Image (cartoon, coloured by chain):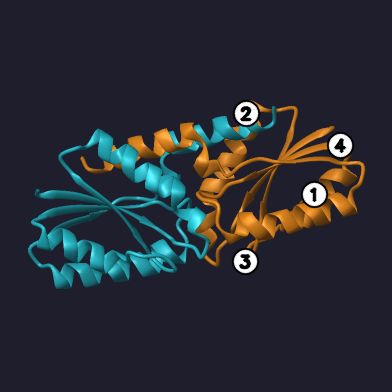
Chain colours: A cyan, B orange
Amino acid sequence: MKRALVLFAHGARAASWAAPFERLRDLTHARLPEVEVRLAFLELMEPRLPETVAALVAGGARELTIVPVFLGQGGHLLRDLPLLAEGLRAAHPGLQLTVAGAVGEDPGVLAAMTDYCVRSLG
Amino acid sequence: MKRALVLFAHGARAASWAAPFERLRDLTHARLPEVEVRLAFLELMEPRLPETVAALVAGGARELTIVPVFLGQGGHLLRDLPLLAEGLRAAHPGLQLTVAGAVGEDPGVLAAMTDYCVRSLG
């Protein structure tokens, strides 16, 4: 195993909050069976990003992509994630780390959300 | 104008956070030109849900659907939004109010997010 994908989500107190992120992880892994796909949280839920990345690197990951499963670019993506990524690069100098843009800013995701909003009106 | 759609989002301190929600509102309104489509926030950003709904009702809205633009069902959707909806029903007894499920739990949105995650790996 050399490549890994980490879906990075906010976290919440309610356990029910994780369900769609777990489905997203499973759906993504089904499309990329040769890639380790993990879910990691910023706060309130485990596992957190640093431990997740450390475990993947210990398992042999050399290329790792973080996808922020956030709707918009707020303080968590503008400040918290860059600091976390800086810490990961310092802790794992041999790792090729890529941070993708927020899921919610993807045109395909926006189009699917638009479809959902239109359908919600009945 | 009788029907209205309110996209209900969390809000954030960073102004940049609102951009994808504003695009979602505009894309949805383009598909539903006869419907008033508004964006309202739970916290940190204006306008808030009660003022938005009051303005729509004052403008003649009689059927109103709230779509939570949230990825998962955390405390905001499990507790805050039901309380807000209860307050709206009490304040506007003639209004037919519907609350949809979270955008992030829609299978079409999950599929689009999966596509994005797969593409992010390059």
Amino acid type of the residue tagged 3 in the rendering: Leu
For the residues labelled 4 and 2, the Cα–Cα distance comes to 18 Å
Q: Quadrant of residue B97?
A: top right
In front of the other: B114 or A46: A46
Task: Find residue B85 and name its label.
Answer: none
- At 55% from the left and 52% from the top, the residue drawn is B73
In front of the other: B88 or B11: B88
For the residues labelled 3 and 1, the Cα–Cα distance comes to 18 Å
Within 10 Å of disc 1 (Cα), the crowding (few <14, some 14-19, many 20+) is many
Amino acid type of the residue tagged 4 in the rendering: Arg
Whether residue B73 is visible, yes or no, is yes
Q: Quadrant of residue A95?
A: bottom left
Residue bearing mark 4: B62
Circles 3 and 2: CB atoms closer than 8 Å = no
For the residues labelled 3 and 2, the Cα–Cα distance comes to 28 Å
- At 68% from the left and 28% from the top, the residue drawn is B32
Residue bearing mark 3: B44
Query: On the same chain: label 3 and label 1?
Result: yes
Under tag 4, what secondary structure?
loop
Residue B14 position, x and y percent, is: 52, 64
Within 10 Å of disc 4 (Cα), the crowding (few <14, some 14-19, many 20+) is some
Under tag 1, what secondary structure?
helix
Residue bearing mark 2: A119
For the residues labelled 4 and 1, the Cα–Cα distance comes to 11 Å
